[in-house]
Image (cartoon, helix red, strand yellow):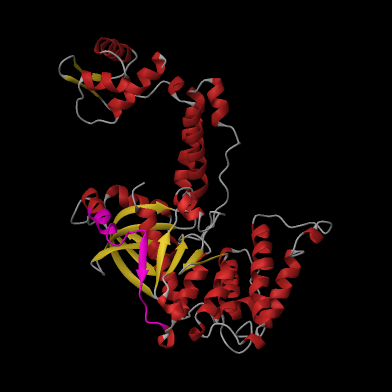
């Protein structure tokens, strides 16, 4: 290890501690003799590091000392640059400006080779789904920083509006939403509020009865309840479903930010007992035990007894057949439209919407190479299929409506689908089904618990 890196490690060791640490302990961490450690401490002090203490007593680094630029590794520069890009693109205007200013300050003091790394465009932050906010996130952050109560008008998923006074605890910036955690005086419990559903907010002069750090500790403790990655749901089965299918264990593998919501809705419509295993992107979703379930390392997936099914449309079709008591599949003689639109949504609609959402569509010359042809053709076909129809495959609600409806609801919500009257009319007949609302509520709970867990 070079002396420069060793000095850096000693500084980092001191930064991690708020109380004096002995020279012997620092020497062990740095892998040097005590005599060398004393020389390194003296060298750091000469460079301007405010290290207080002496041999035999211990050392502590006073806050405020900045590391010399040469002590940033290439990976650390990339991490800082990528983090700044994320903040600039995914937060409020004030934090975005602060991130750009921080990068500019770093660029001014870094050596030329590291400045190039900082401004390298090799690492990009992709677009995320954005929701319009009625309240500036800067106001929510100020309530947190100043430790003041916040009066809000909040509209839930069902459209019901309520007036709340909350004690803000934390503000989470997630891929698809922003969530304010706080103690709710109305519910006398910790609650999570999506920022895009806060219609008005006012910072009150009154401070919460407890300091935010104490509230934060209590909130984290409350999050430990029921945060096991395997959650079991024991709903009463539709029509008292019995038999071999009911006797088999049903495990649902998902992530709150995935297509798993479609399967979650399907499971709630069926009404059978099932357990959930949440898989995290980049970690447990790529673990060997889960790759044995789905070698693609994707969710959702289910395991019903010894049977494993992946791919969302296939899962919906399987569950409809495995639990016929739920009545989510037509009779075999009437399944033409059912299969047609279920797999049209999976094979054509999803691909066309996904490509179109990121600004890419096949050129006329390339359309023959793609299973869906063109976005315009797919959307026109789908619009005709749902026009003046309550359900996509006949006079009865089926698993095909769950999949097609989910695609349309998602597309309308996030702008990936044109807001045609046919789509809005069809989706309005599905979005408030009790099973879908139950699934949506459970997904939000899973997302909150997962997102707020300490890294």
Residue 16's spot in the image, x, y percent? Answer: 29, 31
Magenta-drawn segment: 218-237
Q: Quadrant location of residue 383?
A: bottom right
Residue 358, compared with residue 267, is above or below; it is above
Residue under the point 53% across and 24% down: 114
Q: Quadrant location of residue 61?
A: top left
Q: Nearer the viewer, residue 329 or 85?
A: 329
Q: Dividing the image into 4 quarters, which one contains the N terminus?
A: top left
Q: Nearer the viewer, residue 65 or 268?
A: 268
Compared across the picture, whether 386 is left or right of 50 comes to right
Q: Is residue 232 magenta?
A: yes
Q: Nearer the viewer, residue 104 or 422?
A: 422
Q: From where the camera sits, is residue 276 visible?
A: yes
Residue 194, compared with residue 235, is above or below; it is above
Q: From where the camera sits, is residue 159 visible?
A: no
Compared across the picture, whether 306 is left or right of 455 comes to right
Compared across the picture, whether 53 is left or right of 273 comes to left
Residue under the point 49% across and 33% down: 103
Residue 190's spot in the image, x, y percent? Answer: 27, 62
Residue 102's spot in the image, x, y percent? Answer: 46, 34
Residue 77, compared with residue 1, is above or below; it is below
Residue 432's spot in the image, x, y percent? Answer: 48, 79
């Amino acid at each position: 290890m070079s002396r420069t890196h060793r000095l850096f490690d000693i500084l980092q060791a001191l930064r991690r501690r708020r109380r004096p640490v002995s020279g012997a302990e620092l020497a062990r961490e740095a892998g040097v003799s005590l005599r060398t450690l004393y020389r390194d401490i003296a060298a750091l002090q000469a460079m301007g590091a405010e290290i207080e203490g002496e041999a035999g007593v211990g050392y502590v680094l006073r806050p405020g000392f900045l590391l010399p630029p040469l002590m940033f590794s290439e990976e650390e520069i990339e991490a800082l640059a990528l983090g700044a890009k994320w903040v600039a693109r995914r937060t409020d205007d004030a934090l975005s400006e602060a991130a750009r200013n921080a990068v500019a300050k770093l660029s001014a003091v870094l050596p030329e080779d590291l400045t190039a790394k900082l401004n390298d465009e090799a690492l990009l932050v992709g677009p995320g789904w954005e929701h319009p906010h009625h309240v500036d996130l800067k106001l929510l952050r100020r309530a947190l920083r100043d430790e003041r109560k916040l009066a809000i008008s909040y509209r839930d998923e069902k459209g019901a509006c309520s007036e709340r006074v909350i004690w803000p605890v934390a503000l989470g910036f997630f891929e698809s939403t922003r969530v304010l955690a706080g103690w709710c005086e109305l519910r006398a419990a910790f609650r999570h509020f999506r920022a895009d559903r806060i219609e008005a907010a006012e910072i009150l002069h009154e401070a919460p009865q407890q300091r935010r750090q104490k509230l934060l500790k209590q909130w984290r403790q409350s999050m430990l309840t029921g945060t096991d990655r395997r959650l079991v749901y024991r709903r009463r089965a539709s029509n008292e479903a019995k038999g071999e299918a009911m006797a088999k264990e049903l495990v649902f593998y998902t992530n709150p930010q995935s297509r798993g919501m479609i399967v979650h809705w399907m499971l709630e419509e069926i009404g059978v007992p099932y357990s959930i295993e949440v898989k995290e992107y980049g970690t447990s979703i790529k673990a060997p035990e889960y790759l044995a379930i789905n070698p693609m390392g994707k969710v959702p997936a289910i395991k019903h007894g010894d049977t494993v099914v992946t791919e969302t449309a296939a899962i919906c079709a399987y569950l409809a057949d495995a639990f016929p008591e739920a009545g989510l599949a037509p009779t075999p003689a009437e399944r033409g439209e059912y299969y047609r639109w279920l797999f049209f949504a999976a094979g054509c609609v999803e691909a066309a919407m996904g490509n179109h959402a990121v600004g890419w569509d096949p050129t006329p010359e390339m359309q023959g190479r793609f299973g869906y042809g063109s976005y315009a053709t797919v959307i026109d076909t789908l619009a005709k299929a749902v026009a003046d129809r309550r359900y996509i495959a006949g006079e009865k609600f089926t698993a095909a409506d769950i999949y097609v409806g989910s695609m349309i609801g998602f597309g309308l919500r996030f702008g990936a689908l044109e807001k045609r009257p046919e789509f809005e009319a069809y989706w309005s007949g599905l979005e408030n089904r009790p099973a879908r609302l139950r699934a949506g509520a459970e997904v939000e709970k899973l997302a909150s618990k997962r997102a707020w867990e300490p890294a």
